[in-house]
């Protein structure tokens, strides 16, 4: 097994891209990040890696500082050599399937500071909630308010990135039509994003309802709206991640028709 690394997006081989696309469910994060990179986001400090055995690609990873190292569904036995190959690189966290993420921490010599346990869900049959409000696509006038909500979302969900500026990504995603807002009596009350389909796969997220508007079904409604928007954009495979520490969101998504696929972890490193 051999890991190869590059900081040049165009050097990422087509065979590695094809390996990711063979399983767009378990490799959803890596595929989505790769798509964002190809639109010019997060190039500073970029690292792309791929695993070869003989002449075949068997795995891929991505790192876009200051975010975590993203592990696709790589072979578990390849993790020690990955950790060795990345020794000396500044990596503040690792995110991926729970076994692979845990193995990376164990073999990297790094210390786990904190962990967010996540579950990947895949949409079965979409079931409408008791709709509250009206869903619309976010426009240019919504960029600044949406960025403020994303800052609040990050402070709650990923405090390690609470100081990151979401504005460039929000501008890009609004321009792509990837954010929807739920309005009640003409006032925005919740937000949800979705990724434009990659080989028919779209992922919902983030989903945010401000604290003062919670408990009224807005989260269910805006998630349903984002899911429908993803389907209208051509997705026949819709995914989302939940924080396993939040039983409310896990229940909401299952009520809408999402079904568990696998467990993941996002681990901050010392």
Image (cartoon, grey):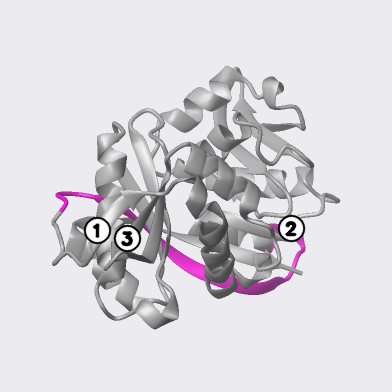
The tally of labels here is: 3
Give the residue at x 37% y 28%: 199
Indicate whether 124 appears above or below 233.
Answer: below
Among the two numbered marks 1 and 3 on one chain, the one whose residue lies closer to the N terminus: 1
Please tell me in which quadrant of the rendered image residue 52 appears.
Answer: top right
The residue tagged with tag 2: helix, strand or loop? helix
Task: Confirm or deny contact between disc 1 and disc 3 (CB under 8 A).
Answer: yes
* First in sequence: mark 2 vs mark 1: 2
Query: What residue is shown at x 31% (from left), y 50% (from top)?
Result: 136
SS assignment at label 3: strand
Q: Please name the residue that numbered disc 3 is placed on.
A: 182
Judge left or right: residue 244 versus residue 115: left
Dividing the picture into quadrants, the one containing residue 207 is: bottom left
Q: Which residue is mark 1?
A: 134
User: As rendered, which of 44 and 222 lies closer to the eye?
Assistant: 222
Residue 4, relative to residue 93: is it above or below? above
**Left or right: 184 in relation to 256:** right
Residue under circle 2? 108
**Residue 259: in sight, yes or no?**
no
What range of the chain is rendered magenta?
A: 106-126
């Amino acid at each position: 097994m051999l890991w190869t690394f590059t900081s040049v997006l165009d050097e990422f081989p087509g065979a590695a891209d094809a390996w990711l696309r063979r399983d767009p469910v378990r490799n959803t994060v890596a595929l989505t990040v790769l798509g964002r990179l190809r639109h010019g986001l997060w190039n500073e400090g970029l690292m792309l890696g791929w695993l070869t055995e003989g002449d075949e690609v068997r795995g891929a990873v991505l790192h876009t500082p200051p975010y975590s190292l993203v592990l696709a569904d790589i072979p578990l036995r390849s993790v020690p050599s990955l950790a060795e190959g990345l020794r000396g690189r500044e990596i503040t966290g690792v995110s991926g399937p729970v076994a692979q993420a845990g193995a990376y921490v164990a073999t990297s010599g790094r210390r786990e500071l904190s962990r967010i346990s996540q579950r990947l869900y895949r949409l079965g049959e979409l079931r409408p909630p008791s709709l509250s409000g009206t869903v619309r696509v976010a426009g240019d006038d919504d960029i600044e308010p949406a960025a403020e909500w994303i800052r609040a979302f990050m402070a709650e969900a990923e405090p390690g990135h609470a100081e990151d500026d979401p504005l460039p990504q929000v501008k890009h995603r609004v321009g792509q039509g990837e954010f929807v807002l739920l309005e009640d009596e003409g006032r925005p009350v919740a937000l949800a994003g979705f990724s434009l389909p990659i080989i028919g796969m779209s992922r919902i997220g983030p989903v945010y309802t401000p604290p003062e508007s919670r408990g009224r079904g807005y989260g269910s409604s805006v998630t349903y709206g984002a899911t429908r928007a993803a389907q209208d954009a051509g997705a026949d495979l819709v995914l989302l991640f939940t924080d396993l520490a939040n039983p409310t969101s896990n229940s909401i998504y299952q009520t809408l028709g999402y079904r568990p696929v696998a467990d993941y972890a996002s681990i901050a490193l010392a």
